[in-house]
Amino acid sequence: MKMYFLCDVVDDSGTPDPLETLDIGWFRIDQLPPLSTTRILESQISMMHQHWLHPDQHTVFY
């Protein structure tokens, strides 16, 4: 089971741990960088984006 959380940025001055994440950044939904598809799919990001745009949508369980 995967769980996704909607979060707010409270401080963007940190740096990622190089053992876990090479880089961080903000991207438009239609300009995503190459994804690590063993961890996240474009369809999952699209689903999360739709929930962000429409927070009244029901929870999705897989």
Image: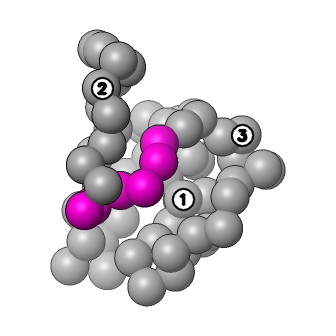
Name the residue nearer the viewer: 57 or 5: 5
Quarter assignment of residue 34:
bottom right
Q: Image check: 37 left or right of 61?
A: right
The amino acid type found where label 3 is placed reads Arg
Q: Position of residue 19 (x, y in %)?
A: 25, 62
Look at label 1 and name its amino acid.
Answer: Ile
Where is mark 3, residue-wise? 28
- Visible residue check, residue 51: no
Which comes before the other along the chain, label 2 or label 1? 2
Q: Nearer the viewer, mark 3 or mark 2?
A: 2
Q: Where is residue 44 shown, x and y percent of the image?
A: 51, 67
In the rendered image, which quarter is residue 20 located in?
A: bottom left
Q: Quadrant of the C terminus?
A: bottom left
- The local crowd at label 1, few if under 14, some if 14 to 19, many if 20 or more residues have their Cα within 10 Å, is some
* x and y percentages locating residue 48 in the rendered image: 48, 52
- Distance Cα–Cα, label 2 vs label 1: 23 Å
Image disc number at residue 45: 1
Say whether disc 3 or disc 2 marks the residue closer to the N-terminus: 2
Location of residue 4 by image quarter = bottom left
Query: What amino acid type should be assigned to the residue bearing mark 2?
Result: Gly
Q: Which residues are magenta?
A: 19-24
Q: Residue at x 25, y 49 (%)?
A: 17
